[in-house]
Amino acid sequence: MAKTNINRILVALDSSQVNRSTLQAATTLATNLDAELNALFVEDINLLRLAELPNAREVVYGSSSYRRISVDDMERSIHTQTVRLRKLVETISQQSEMEITFDVQRGNVADLVCSASEQTDLLIIGKNTQRLRQSLKVGSITQTILSSASCNLMVLQHGATLERPVAVFFSGSMGSHKAMQLAIQIVEQDHKNLNVIYPASAEEEFNKLKQEVNSLTLPLGFEANHIQLKDDSSAAMLATLINCGARMLLLESRHDVQSKKYIQSLIEQSSTPIILIN
């Protein structure tokens, strides 16, 4: 069986107010997989460049007024955020009794996060890594990371927690075998909470895929819940996740145009944490 070894996890923190839940989700997964956990905060160089513009203004929250913002103001704001995150990492580390390293870099957020992904096995990011209009579901930074990250990737809806049941999409490919292996690790001994979702296909192919999965799970003393999609659309997957009550989805990450659109649609429309396996 193809394996996905997760020994190092990197969680990318941002300037939002939900980093605590993101870190807690990361510690849960790191504990489950017996992996080391590292946190990264990128001080966004573009904010400083914005502050250098002569007409840069900051809107005062809760009003229609605004004030001039300077480079010094922005530097102080970034420094305050960095100090706050460092304290948060220390607090979560103490509460979880897990060592968490904290690294701070300055530059382009997407570029530095993608570069850091080359040194880890799993990167965890929030769905939105910048402030967005309500009509937008996935920020440009997140989209860039989705396209360019070098490792396995977890996308968390901000505020989401990691719970069971777990769902894994299995097509028989090498990537889906890796996703299956990781799903078994995540559910540990609570195997009744593993749902295996299969592509829409003829009954003969469906039965063949079920036999493959049974050959992996039955020696471990359990049989997963088998669910076949009605069709291969993202809408069908989303409906299936709701019907089986899945709180996490694992599937392989393919890089053709159609697969990218499918995965982005799932991320945009679902509040379920998604792990993409390379």
Image (cartoon, helix red, strand yellow):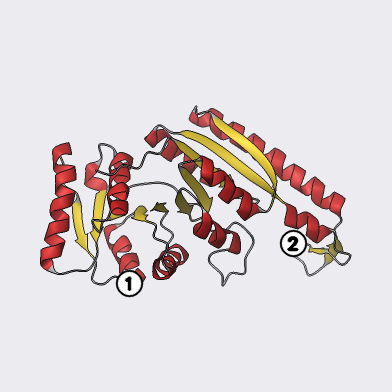
Q: Which mark is residue 61?
A: 2
| Residue beneath the point at 35% across and 42% down | 4
Q: Is residue 66 visible?
A: yes
Q: Is residue 18 visible?
A: no
Question: Could you tell me if the residues under marks 2 and 1 are in contact, i.e. CB atoms within 8 Å?
Answer: no
| Residue beneath the point at 27% across and 58% down | 244
- Residue 222 drawn at (x, y percent): 16, 42
- Residue 268 drawn at (x, y percent): 47, 66
Residue 108 left/right relative to 229:
right
Quadrant of the drawing holding the N terminus? top left
| Residue beneath the point at 73% across and 64% down | 62
Tag 1 residue:
233
Per the model, the C-alpha gap separating discs 2 and 1 is 40 Å
Quick one: 142 or 60, which is closer to the camera? Answer: 142
Amino acid type, label 2 = Tyr
Eye-nearest disc, 2 or 1: 1
Amino acid type, label 1 = Ser
> Element at badge 1?
loop
